[in-house]
Image (cartoon, grey):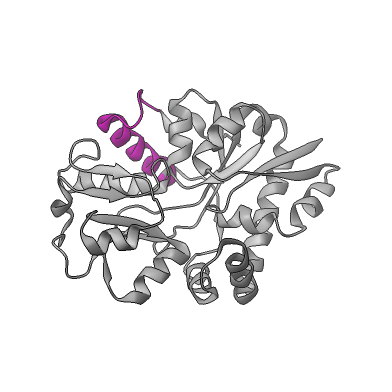
Amino acid sequence: MTVTLGVHRSNPSLYYLSRLDYLDEELAKIGEQGRFHHYSDGTRTGALLAEGVIDLGGTGSTPPITAQAAGHDLVYTAVSAPRPDHGALLVLADGPVQRIADLKGRTVVLGIGSWQTHLLAKALHRAGLSYRDSITAERPAGDEAERLRTGAIGGWIAQGAELEAARRTGEFRVLVPTGEVISDRSVFFARREFATAHREAVAAITAALARADRWVAEHLDEAAALAAADQGGEVADHRAALAALPWQLEPVTAEFIAEQQEAADIFRQVGFIERPVLVRDAFLEA
């Protein structure tokens, strides 16, 4: 059997695993082999699983919820430790937005459908505002820093190296630190049919991901140079972003399921998903 993993640059563990030999090494122990399917939009992970294009993928917290809402039968296989410094909601340092309530009626740029939707929806909800009714959400177009400077947008959720680059300018400040609102874990999930029939393969993939995480933690300079060459940006910004991540996998816990359920309930309330989701249905029993 050949196991196919989905890879996109927004999931750092899979991104680096695809550039190392660990997947084949771990799968070889059970007589299997692996391959990678590269794609650009992590929000498509649920659909790619359902279509059988990939067997297992990884994203932030939102895509598995929207996948369940779309009727895809998936199960969680592992999560990362919390990533409190992975991203943040930025505003102009001396601009009119001083608190979350000041975003009402303004445009916020974010990765719609990514973990950033979870962050913004929950932050607004806690402030008595609504993702659907209080702000206008727009996808990034590559000019977010300039639009913040001119006041064309009220906020921008940035992550990774782009967040580090924005911070270096001194022009922006963090309005909402991610870790104060959500745990922002990296989340790995698979088709239920695959995960239940091939538990040894799932365990091998998890072991390979853990090895890739350890490699990055021990080779930050090399990993940052690789990302900068592939994705653009300054090596120093990539290194700072990588150093802020925990590089540690954890099992799926009741605490994680509860946080996902809270997100699903907020998404349903504001119309981001069209039907209720019971997150515990995606819990894979041992």
Q: Position of residue 261 (x, y in %)?
A: 37, 36
Can see residue 75? yes
* Quarter that holds the C terminus: top right
Q: Is residue 115 above or below residue 163?
A: above
In depth, the one of 162 and 26 nearer the eye is 162
The span shown in magenta is: 255-277
Rendered position, 184 above or below 95: above
- Going 35% across and 72% down the picture, which residue do you hit? 167
Camera sees residue 175:
no
Where, by quadrant of the figure, is residue 113 drawn?
top left
SS assignment for the magenta stretch, majority: helix
Relative image position of residue 226 (x, y in whole percent): 64, 67
Query: Observer-nearest residue: 262 or 174?
Result: 174
Q: Quadrant of residue 143?
A: bottom left
Residue at x-position 43% and y-position 33%: 66
User: Which residue is situated farthest in the right direction here?
Assistant: 31
Residue 272 lies in the magenta-colored region: yes
Judged left or right of residue 182, residue 210 is: right
Residue 230 x, y percent position in the rendering: 62, 62
The magenta stretch spans residue 194: no
Picture layout, residue 250 above or below residue 49: below
> Position of 124 compared to 168: left or right?
left
Q: Residue at x 48, y 45 (%)?
A: 253
| 164 with respect to 210 (left or right) | left
Q: How many marks?
A: 0
Residue 101 relative to residue 48: left or right: left
Quadrant location, the N terminus: top right
Residue 218 placement (x, y as % from top left): 63, 73
Location of residue 258 by image quarter: top left
